[in-house]
Image (cartoon, grey):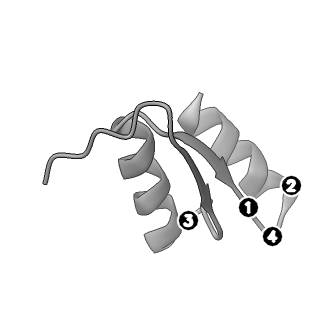
Amino acid sequence: MQLNLEGQTAIVTGASRGIGAAIADTLAAAGAAVAGTATTPEGAAAIQQRLD
């Protein structure tokens, strides 16, 4: 599936692992600015590191 999300913003809950991580990665690869949530500081750091 081709997505062009340039200029769009996505908020993904549970973005540090599992399905949430896969969704965040896919949206970011399609050009969206992704804001993700996590339940731990380590999870939040993992999101930032992966998506930067």
Q: Which residue is mark 4?
A: 39
- Residue 16 image position (x, y, % from top left): 62, 60
- Residue 38 in the image: above or below residue 32: below
Q: Would you say 19 lies left or right of 40 here?
A: left
Q: CA distance from mark 2 to mark 1?
A: 10 Å
Q: Which residue is mark 2?
A: 41
Task: Give yes or no for contact between labels 2 and 3 (Cβ–Cβ under 8 Å).
Answer: no
Q: CA distance from mark 2 to mark 4?
A: 7 Å
Q: Would you say 19 lies left or right of 52 here?
A: left
Q: CA distance from mark 3 to mark 1?
A: 10 Å
Q: Which residue is mark 3?
A: 17
Say which quarter of the image contains residue 52: top right
Callout 3 crowding tier (Cα within 10 Å): few <14, some 14–19, many ≥20? some
Task: Give yes or no for contact between labels 1 and 4 (Cβ–Cβ under 8 Å).
Answer: yes
Q: CA distance from mark 2 to mark 3?
A: 13 Å
- Residue 43 image position (x, y, % from top left): 73, 57
- Amino acid type of the residue that numbered disc 3 sits on in the rendered structure: Arg
Farthest-out residue, left: 1
Task: Give yes or no for contact between labels 2 and 1 (Cβ–Cβ under 8 Å).
Answer: no
- Residue 9 image position (x, y, % from top left): 58, 45
Q: Secondary structure at mark 3?
A: loop
Q: CA distance from mark 1 to mark 4?
A: 7 Å
Locate the N terminus by quadrant.
Answer: bottom left
Q: Which residue is mark 1?
A: 37
Q: CA distance from mark 3 to mark 4?
A: 10 Å
